[in-house]
Image (cartoon, rainbow, N blue to C red):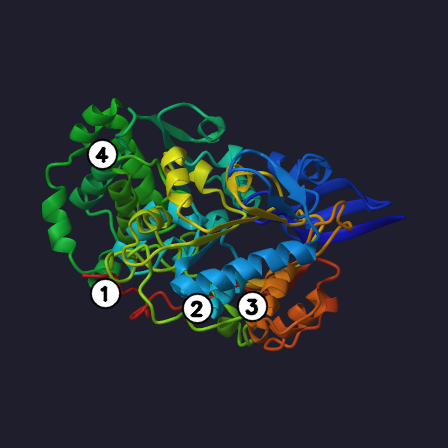
Amino acid sequence: MKKTVFSMCGMCTVRCPIRVEVEDNEVTWIEGNPHLLKGALCGKGSAGTALLKDTERPQQPLIRAGGRGAGRWREASWDEALDYVADKLKTIKAEHGPESAVLTSRGGPWQGMYKTFIHAFGSPNYTNHDNTCGRNTHHASLSINGVGRKGFVYDIANADHLVLFGRNMFASLRIAENLQTLDMLDKGGKLTYVDVRQSMTGLKATRFFQVRPGTDYALALGFIHEIIKRGIYDKTFIDRYVSGFEELCEFIEPYTAAWAAKECGIKEKGIVQFIDEVAEGMPRVIFHPGWNLSRYKDSFYASRALHTLNILMGNIEQKGGLIIPKGAGDCGAKGIRNLDCPKPDIKRADGVGWKYNHFDKGPGLAHLFFDAMKTGDPYPVKAWISMRTDPFTSMPDPQAQKEAFDNCDLLVAIDTHYGEFAWYADVILPESTYLERDNPICLQKGPKPRLAVRRKAVEPKFDTKPAWEIFKLLADRLDMGEHFPYSTIEELIACRLEGPGIPLGDFAEKALFPLTIPPVCKDPENLNGRFRPPS
């Protein structure tokens, strides 16, 4: 039997919409959703069947039978494994308090479920993958714009000039962004690429700056100096929305184009010519701050400089510039209903929000939980639940981490595959791969916001479960079931769709539901109150 399923990729954080061909419960083809991506999909997304066909992934719940990391397991039923985890959590809660548990997840559009679980348990300690990923650009944007790195989307298709610092776009993620860039180039737009080496994106660029490693901040400063010196900035935008411009002018004085050229190992003439092109294209010029830029000493400041360049362009909420993402309310619709439980009024064990006030409490600082494990300050951490994240492969010094984890009474891995952490855990609760599971409705913000859903393409090949079911079953065992008011995925989706009032059947043909057809725009001359950077 053949069928077509519209769904959502799960091979990376972008979660592109996909079309899946299925025959006799086997995936035969995956491509980008033609309604949005014209069938295009990256190599990683196209290889999704490899996850499905991997016979070496956990095929049923496993409970450790030897020392941690020894690789000795015994197979267990779901009831036994869930009872084991719930009983351990109850004991830890009674002996050390609910705050002694930490839950870390992959993050993403369904993290409200994971936060609800740990908050209902009584712990404030939620963290996710983003604390080791995009924090550089996130905090750089917060410090300049008062909104994080997801506070803007990029109208690349309508831009006249796109500037990329080390973002090898055509060899990486975000197919929609790549298609928009190709459209921009086809219409005569310019692409400037900055990197220490040539790449696929550099080959397609109209201008390539090959800089010395660690000098991208210097180049950005040189750009700012040249723009200010020549008056190539939006004076009206600066006067209306920007504070500290005089201080910027004073600071930037020594960082001339000649200085930047010498630091970067490039020609001054190239910088001057580039600024000429910027002057021709503004405000439709985008300085992309990157995914997380390079992680080196000056990369936070380089990212701040790129955000500063966008401000000088006056390109916010302008066609071909930086667009403020719109949600359901901006389209006159009601938002989806999220699972929710108030966060307990307890200090986080990683110090975020009370000891480290300059970091936002969303993803936390996962590596600082290890200090609490070792010292018991501000209180002991005794349980660690890892939802498709692996601290051993995402943070340095796994041996030191293991020594800290050995102070925990419970380590749980919820994952589709064995990872380094899963191998060290006490219990593995195997999650179904993204092709074998449904996920709830989520909102994807942008100039044209939409709702999206992941639909199961095939039945699970092994005794695995989706996360929404795993957390529901655990919550019931911990007397927290009222925070998870559903029994099936249909009930969960219906719960989330109560606000917008859209039937699930409307997602069948595309797995997408647009909340607007024309883009929703704000008045660029009335953005007061949108930006509240910290002093």
Q: Are marks 4 and 3 in contact (CB under 8 Å)?
A: no
Measured in 3D between alpha carbons, the distance from the residue under mark 3 to the one under mark 1, in whole angstroms, is 54 Å
Amino acid on which disc 3 is placed: Leu
Measured in 3D between alpha carbons, the distance from the residue under mark 4 to the one under mark 1, in whole angstroms, is 28 Å
Which callout, 4 or 3, points at the residue further toward the start of the chain? Answer: 4
Q: In which quarter of the image is residue 242?
A: bottom left
Query: Nearer the viewer's eye, disc 3 or disc 1?
Result: 3
- Where in the figure is residue 345, as x and y percent of width and height? 34, 71
Would you say 510 lies left or right of 318 here? right
Count of numbered tags = 4
Which callout, 3 or 1, points at the residue further toward the start of the chain? Answer: 1
Q: Quadrant of residue 218?
A: top left
Measured in 3D between alpha carbons, the distance from the residue under mark 3 to the one under mark 2, in whole angstroms, is 11 Å
- Where in the figure is residue 453, as x and y percent of width and height? 65, 59
Residue drawn at (36%, 58%) of the image:
316
Residue that label 2 marks: 122
Residue that label 3 marks: 478
**Which secondary structure lies at badge 2?**
loop
**Which secondary structure lies at badge 4?**
helix
Query: Nearer the viewer's eye, disc 4 or disc 1?
Result: 4
> What is the number of the mark on residue 218?
4
**Which secondary structure lies at badge 3?**
loop
